[in-house]
Image: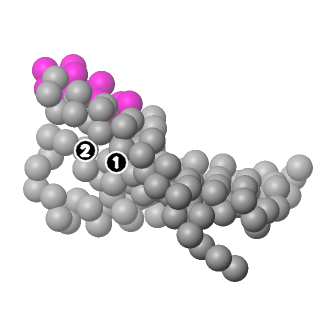
Amino acid sequence: MLQNLLFVGLGGFIGASLRYATGLFVGRFVADTQFPYGTFVVNMLGCLLIGFLAGLSDSRALLSDTSRAFVFTGMLGAFTTFSTFSYETMGLLQNGQTSPALTNLGLQIILGLLAVWVGIQLSKLVSF
């Protein structure tokens, strides 16, 4: 149990660091600050990755319990940003920016689910 806790913490550090770096990277290419593009990209990548890695892990039993804790709970849990997504959407609503808020809400949920599905489908194409 302590080992898993340490791996979750290490994965969380890596995931949070990658989340921050990804947000900075996306920010370099987007001038429009009304829509939270960094959070959107992070969440879509996280959904795609968790679908792909879970698909591989579930179909081929590739990850141990400790590895799953490190990757899914630690890295991807810290990389994706549902709380930030919720906070930014609420901020848009409170500022009267209903259209960007609803766009963010719809895209994150619908495309997030689609990204998980695509990740699972991609994992089926990988052969070992």
Residue type, numbered disc 1: Thr
Residue 120 in the magenta stretch? The answer is no
Mark 2 neighbour density, 10 Å: few (under 14) some (14–19) many (20 or more)? many
Q: Secondary structure at mark 1?
A: helix
Mark 1 neighbour density, 10 Å: few (under 14) some (14–19) many (20 or more)? many
Q: State the mark number for residue 125.
A: none
Residue type, numbered disc 2: Pro
The residue singled out by tag 2 in the image is: 36
* 113 vs 94, nearest the viewer: 113
Q: Quadrant of the C terminus?
A: bottom right
Residue at the image position 50 percent from the left and 49 percent from the top: 116
* 110 vs 81, nearest the viewer: 110
* 22 vs 49, nearest the viewer: 49
Left or right for 50, reference 4: left
Residue at the image position 19 percent from the left and 42 percent from the top: 35
Disc 2, disc 1: CB below 8 Å?
Answer: yes
Residue at the image position 56 percent from the left and 55 percent from the top: 120
Residue 10, x across and y down, in percent: 67, 61
Residue at the image position 42 percent from the left and 57 percent from the top: 45
* 34 vs 120, nearest the viewer: 120
Q: Secondary structure at mark 2?
A: loop
Quadrant assignment, res 76: bottom right
Q: Magenta stretch? A: 85-97
Q: Which residue ends up furthest to the right in the rendered image?
A: 1
Residue 92 in the magenta stretch? The answer is yes
The residue singled out by tag 1 in the image is: 39
Left or right for 79, reference 11: left
Residue 51, x across and y down, in percent: 55, 53
Q: Which residue ends up furthest to the left in the rendered image?
A: 31
Q: Which residue ends up furthest to the bottom in the rendered image?
A: 128
Residue 62, x across and y down, in percent: 76, 67
Quadrant assignment, res 94: top left
